[in-house]
Each structure stands twice: as C-alpha cells, then as structure tokens.
Image (cartoon, rainbow, N blue to C red):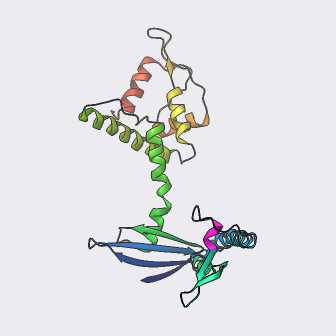
C-alpha cells in the first residue's frame, strides 16, 4: 500500500494506492482518492447518514424494524438484533439496537472515491486525470448512437457492417477536431444542425450560387476555420470551383 500526498491551489490531495492479486495471477491496482476540498461532500454524506440513523431509531422505538434492507441506503442496515446471549442461550426478549460498528466503518470512507484500473505502470495522478475524462468517452458513445445514427444497424453482411461503423468513427473523429478548432463553444447538436442547414442555391446556369441559410456567429467561425466563405451575396461558378478545390486540399 502506498500513500501519496500532493498540493495544488491550497488543496491537499491524499492518494492511497493498493494492489490486489487476482486468482488468475494478475494484479488490479485500486487507487483511492480523498481531496481536501471534498470535506463538504464528506459532511453531506454524514448529514444524510444522521437522518437515516434517526429513522432507524424510530423504527426500533415503534417496533417496525423486522423488514430487511431493500438497498444499500436503507436505514434498516443500522439495526442489529440479538436473539441469544453470549453463552448461546435463547433470549426471552429480543435485543434490538443501533449498530455503531457499522456506522463507524461507513464513516471511514466518507470523502473517498475508489478507482479500479489495470494501468499498473501509471502514476496515481495520471489514473485520476484519466478517470475525470471518462465523461468524454461516454459522450462519444452518445453522439455515435444519436447524432450519427450508428445504431440500429440495418445491414447483414460483415463487410458492410464494418464499413458502416468505420464511417461513423471517421465522422466522430472529424467532429472532435472541428469542435476543438471552434474552441469547444458549441454543442454537437448546434454544430451538426448548422452544417446541415448551410445549403447553397443556384438560380440558373452561370448565375453563381447564393446562400440559403442565415449567417450566425457559428457560421462565421466555421468559415474562419475552413479558410473560405460561402455567405457572400453571390459566389461565382469560378469562385465555387476554387472553394471545392480548397476544401479537398488541392492547390
């Protein structure tokens, strides 16, 4: 077991790292984090527990304590019953009381957060940093399923299924790059809806192109990022061919 203490911005970070050997022979590293600024969260947990202890005592006083705990936060977990003496003899009266040992054990972990990982060579601060970015991974799955329609898959051939998901992953990669270039100021829905609405209208042959979308702050940033503009009143045919070449990276 290893204890690491670091400081940042007048906040103390306590890390306890412990390795547990698996039956298969491998090891799993468990990093337990306690932040100095988590004292508010620790006090919040103890406030909730105090209310549960009060409800448990009310159950004992009213005699309604025989129900089994329904979940890990059920006040019944603090109720302990003895139906025999220390010598093993049956009691005439059931002894019911608050389990102070369980309360003390729960209080030991207030303010702590456990992380299980197989990154045995990573430093504790790296594990904590990676774990704090987990929401970005979950967001990627949400974008894949909702905005890019990765599922359901209406395909049967294996090569087509692979091609479908490859297209979705490439689209997600391009979106993430674009999101970074836009300074992460817009949501996925805002960016995709804006791109889909940026349509051009061509009144006739050799009459150029006119935008059929409304210019906004996000369209301005998209044009600035792309290096060309399509929101002029009229874009000539030659100008549009130049934009297409530029969008393909050709000079």
Relative height, residue 65 to residue 98 (above, below): above
**Does the magenta run of residues contain 246?**
no
Q: Would residue 134 be visible to someone looking at this image?
A: yes
Residue at image location 51% in from the left, 34% down from the top: 192
Q: Looking at the picture, how far across and down is residue 198, in whole percent?
A: 52, 26
User: Quadrant location of the N terminus?
Assistant: bottom left
Relative height, residue 165 to residue 55 (above, below): above
**Does the magenta run of residues contain 68?**
yes
Q: Would residue 230 be visible to someone looking at this image?
A: no
Q: Looking at the picture, how far across and down is residue 188, in whole percent?
A: 52, 40
Q: Looking at the picture, how far across and down is residue 159, in whole percent?
A: 24, 34
Residue at image location 39% in from the left, 44% down from the top: 173
- As drawn, is 88 to the left or to the right of 157? right
Most common secondary structure along the magenta stretch: loop
Boundaries of the magenta span: 63-78
Is 30 or 200 nearer to us in this picture?
Answer: 30
- Report which quarter residue 94 is drawn in: bottom right
Total labels: the figure holds 0
Relative height, residue 44 to residue 241 (above, below): below
- Report which quarter residue 155 is drawn in: top left
- As drawn, is 70 to the left or to the right of 27? right
Spot the residue most to the top. 204
User: Quadrant location of the C terminus?
Assistant: top left
């Amino acid at each position: 077991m290893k204890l690491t203490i670091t400081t940042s911005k007048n906040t103390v970070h306590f890390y306890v790292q412990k390795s547990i050997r698996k039956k298969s022979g491998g090891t799993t590293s468990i990093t337990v984090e306690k932040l100095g600024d988590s004292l508010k969260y620790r006090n919040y947990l103890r406030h909730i527990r105090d209310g549960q202890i009060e409800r448990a005592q009310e159950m004992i006083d009213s005699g309604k304590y025989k129900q089994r705990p329904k979940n890990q936060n059920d006040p019944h977990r603090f109720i302990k019953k003895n139906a025999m003496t220390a010598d093993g003899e049956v009691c005439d009266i059931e002894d019911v009381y608050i389990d102070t040992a369980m309360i003390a054990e729960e209080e030991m972990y207030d303010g702590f957060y456990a992380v299980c990982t197989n990154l045995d060579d990573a430093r504790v601060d790296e594990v904590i940093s990676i774990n704090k970015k987990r929401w970005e991974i979950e967001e990627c799955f949400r974008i894949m399923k909702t905005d890019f329609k990765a599922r359901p898959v209406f395909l049967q051939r294996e090569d087509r299924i692979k091609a479908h998901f490859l297209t979705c992953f490439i689209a997600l990669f391009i979106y993430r790059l674009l999101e970074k270039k836009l300074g992460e100021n817009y949501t996925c829905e805002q960016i995709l809806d804006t791109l889909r609405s940026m349509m051009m209208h061509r009144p006739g042959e050799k009459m150029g192109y006119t935008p059929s979308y409304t210019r906004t702050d996000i369209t301005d940033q998209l044009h600035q990022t792309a290096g060309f503009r399509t929101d002029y009143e009229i874009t000539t045919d030659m100008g549009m061919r130049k934009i297409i070449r530029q969008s393909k990276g050709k000079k």
